[in-house]
Image (tube, coloured by chain):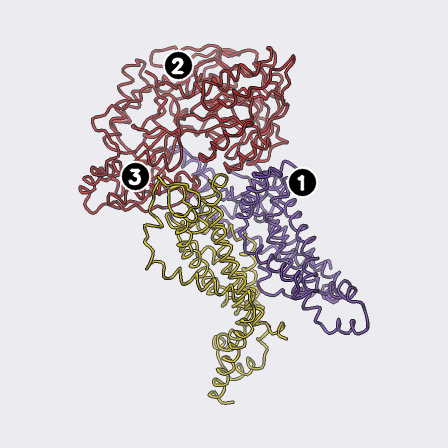
Amino acid sequence: MHRYIIKRILMLIPVIVGVSLLVFVMMDMAPGTVVDIIGGEMSTEELAELNHQLGYDRSVFYRYFLYMKDLLHGDLGTSFIYKMDVWDLYMQRLPATLELAGASVLLAILLSIPLGIKAATGHGGLTDNVSMVAALLGLSMPNFWLGMMLIVLFSNRLGWLPSYGATDGIKSLILPALTIGTGLMATLTRTTRSSMLDVLRADYLRTARSKGVPEKKVVSKHALKNALIPIITIIGTQLGNAVGGAVVTENVFAWPGVGRLIIDAINQRDTTTVTGCIIMTTVMICVIMMVVDIIYAFVDPRLRAQYASGKTRKRAPKVRGGEAA
Amino acid sequence: MSKNTESVSRKYRKRGKLGEIWHHFKKNKGAMAGLIILIVMFAVALTIDFWLDQEKVIGQNIREKLQSPNAAHWFGTDEMGRDMFWRVVYGSRYSLAIGFVAVIVSLIVGVPLGAAAGYYGGKIEGLIMRVTDIFSAIPSILMGVVIVSILGGSTINLMIAVGISSVPNFVRITRAAVLTVKNEEYVEAARALGKTDMYIIFRHILPNCLSPIIVQTTLRVASAIVSASSLSFLGLGIKPPSPEWGALLTAGKTYIRGYSYLCLFPGLAIMITVLAFNMVGDGLRDAMDPKLKR
Amino acid sequence: MKRTLSFALAALLAVSLAGCGQSGSAEPAATTAAAAQETTAAQEQAEQAEPEATGEQGYREHLTIAFESQITDLDPQGVGNANEIHAKLFNMTHDTLFNYNVETGEIDPELATSWEWLDDACTQLHVTLRDDVTFHNGNKLTAEDVAFTLDRVQTDTQITDYYDHCEILGDHELTIVLKSGNVDFTYILSRPFDSIVNKAAVEADPDFGGTIGTGVWINNLDGYVAGDRIELIRNDNYWGELPPTKSITIVHIANASSRLMALESDEVQLIYKLEPTEIELARSNPDVEVNEFATTRLYYFAFNTSAGPAEDVNLRKAVAYAINKDDLIAAVGDTGAEVAKTFYGNAMSYYTEEFDEDITYDPEKAKEYVALCGNNTSLKLMVNTSDNIFKTLSEVIQEELRQVGITMEIEEVDSAGISANTRYDTATHEAMLYSIGLNTWDSDMGRLFSVGTNSNKAIVDDSRISELLLEGSACVDPAERGEYYKEIQAINNDQCYYLPLYYCSTTIAYHAGLQGITINPTGYFDYSQICLPE
């Protein structure tokens, strides 16, 4: 297990190097620099001076090299816009993002897994059809549109819930979590149903049934356990996506999360902030994936044996296309 | 088996397979509904220039601005007095085109990379998959924002932006599919006959990986339409006065309280289109996936 | 001569009054309501004036204000934050030497108790400071701090073009020496970006020392989430009047509809800039008061006059005659907007509309000018996507130009892109739409015409205008000064470097009964005395 964790961390290094280079190059190619944002009404000479101070008179690779040198010392750089350490900025925003990610994924788990199981066991029945149509609808709605409509309905027309920010505890969490959660719920219900269907048809369950094990127990004890792996994969992926910040939803709800910070920073060409936040997101996703892998090991003893032998390439069974989208 | 008989038999088999897929697909009511919606939309989008006066779509009439839906303007009018119904209908051109071209972009880039990774394995695979990891570490919206900012806002650039951000998906799907067939006997046989790698990949491997790729393509068109509208929503995308749905939503969000129909109809249009693609995609998958056949 | 600022005055009467002094007797709510009748905006409020407070009046301890853009920097001299949003914050947390009095248009004392120009050329300003002012960290305000603050300004051309050095004459006495004369320098120093900071604090902590001011409100850095919110705590050692409110949170809500919803549900108590279509909606809510007033923000169309198709003055004139400014205002739904007839600040002293050639909407005349352009009839317009108003304006103008035979392509870029593409020395735009919040003193026009600065979006290099600007700012005689500034307007009207479109109006909305807001048409509002009787 330790070897596995170390290996994953080592694999993270080239990804971080690559991601940060990509961000630097992309930000460099975008029109304008942070100097254009903060140099609103400066004269040509003052702009040139500021350009020099911030290193924009040198090539992007030189600036990247300087950044990486700092990164080696654990320094994520300083934001030119907010005049703060990027680490501090990220940490200011992370709690709100985690809160939202956790709430929406939890919402999805609590609703989708039971629904998916119900749909699979009653395959072709009313619950199945209704929940599948609902899931498809949920999957087809643009996030931001749903968010806007929820705000109009719940905070504007009915006045039940706050429309912005993270200032009102649980109450302000509900609408954004629902907005993100709808897509997650749709995906998770579909995954649960299809992987349950696969398992329910498997031979060993037929054997169990023929031995007279009651259907309820077949589902809860045997089927669910075996259907769990694709479900966990999906949850892991979604949690990973959510930790990166739900850019659009955070924008609609003025949620003080990482996604909004990244977008604001891109708009202001704040390269260090964008890079720092994306590096941190990459690290977070890696940690989540690691946890997911460890959970696999608990769920499936065969996989545990694999980790122990140090073979990490083989991941859990792939989820069928589309549902991972 | 001689070359001739081989190709003949494959032809037959292929036709038979297509027929079988259609047979299964037909039975799926949702998928058929989706297909019909899409056929109608395509018919409208392709022919609209022949029967609709452009003036109806872009002509402004400030005096008729912000009318609620009525007999003359089914979906009401926007802040410049343009008829929302025709704008939404005309917008289908942009959204469908963006969805398709974007996915074609990611197919062209993603499939060969995924195939190479799956087929060659080893260092090539490692490299391709690491680069894919790097690209997928960057949120797709972000990628879109940066690409559109770099290249400037235009329909083509929006397509490229959305397309590139779904490349990693196709790389992964293709690689996984190739892995399952690359050790099949017919591939070994082709290799033994000394065929080039290119020949083997395009002639033997990819045709046998088509079903997951086709399914993924259909579903990705759907999500490309959503991504494109999200980018428009964040203020990047189509040049005015083109009535792309995302752009209509962005313009409408200013009026969401008093004139919520300005947001409602373009949003519904997106939802119905995406739903149709998803239903067709689901239907195709069920029809193509041998596991679900009874 | 000064154009009346009646719009501002009406608003002022309604809102600011004497604030809600803690020490003095509680202001009866009815007085406020009576004054508010002056504006139609607040009439509903009068009908349901709150019952008079009996005895000691209670105030809400904590208030929340929503800003429409981000606070990125708490330091008044931070690089790149000289905008309306930060001005509102600095007005609360810091003090300036002088206070611009919106009602009289004159300069009032603030940290300075008295001042005088030592010479006729206006190059030496003698200033005496208050001696009872302490910073939030407990240090006393001295002349040293003032000199340090002015020396600290590096990137603000309005200061750096004129300011040379300070001569400290005592603890509370100094002379500000300028490179060249500027009669408006006291006005310039009244801007919130020239708030005085503490030398010792900045030297001890270069990153956050500048957040320490002498103002009514103290930045609470523990409650600061950069770009999202900042908490302010009342400074009980303030030298002036204190509001009864104890703490304030400023939050950022970018979407105007969301801001109004937050106000309606009492999540926030004060917002600025409503969606034009939602003003009526807000007015119909008895818990919300709405004030609509004209501003000095000028929306304009700028040509790149030094390169590209718009070098041709005929094309510029064709565009000028093709634009119907009333339609633009109708399209953006800005009912209180005022058509701009000259490219000049509407609150400046020497505004004039008397020109030889009256440029108004005239498609026939536009076509005549188009005929003079030959094949040069297409133009690319660069538009900032971050503001919907520009998008709307550009679409209407596109259509109007199409009517007279000019093809205009709209190129959408974001803020950084537009700024990069319109830098004075490397400009690539052909034309652009933009807006500028103008100050009330005439020399402020220099920002738009001075050669080599980034805000000269028309890339104008007109030697006569430069000369006039220099002479105007150093000229003590008001009549003579007026002639200079009027000539600048005449030149622009003739050359059409910039096309003035309109001065926008804006709205402020707040919880019914809220007091202590000082509205300033420049957007530098003062919220420091804000309070809400309960």
Pick out the residue farthest to the right: A212
Which amino acid type corresponds to the residue marked 2 in the rendered image? Gln
Which amino acid type corresponds to the residue marked 1 in the rendered image? Ile
Spatial CA span between label 3 and label 1: 52 Å
- Against A194, residue A49 (above or below) is above
Q: Which numbered mark, 3 or 1, is in the foreground of this view?
A: 1
The chain shown in yellow is which?
B
The hue in which chain A appears in the rendered picture of the protein? purple
Coordinates of residue C404 in the picture (x, y in percent) = 24, 43
- Left or right of B66 on screen, residue C208: right
Which amino acid type corresponds to the residue marked 3 in the rendered image? Asn
Residue in front for this viewpoint, C404 or B40? B40
Q: Can residue C369 be seen in this view?
A: yes
Coordinates of residue C359 in the picture (x, y in percent) = 24, 31
Residue at label 3? C304
Spatial CA span between label 1 and label 2: 59 Å
Q: Can residue C214 be seen in this view?
A: no
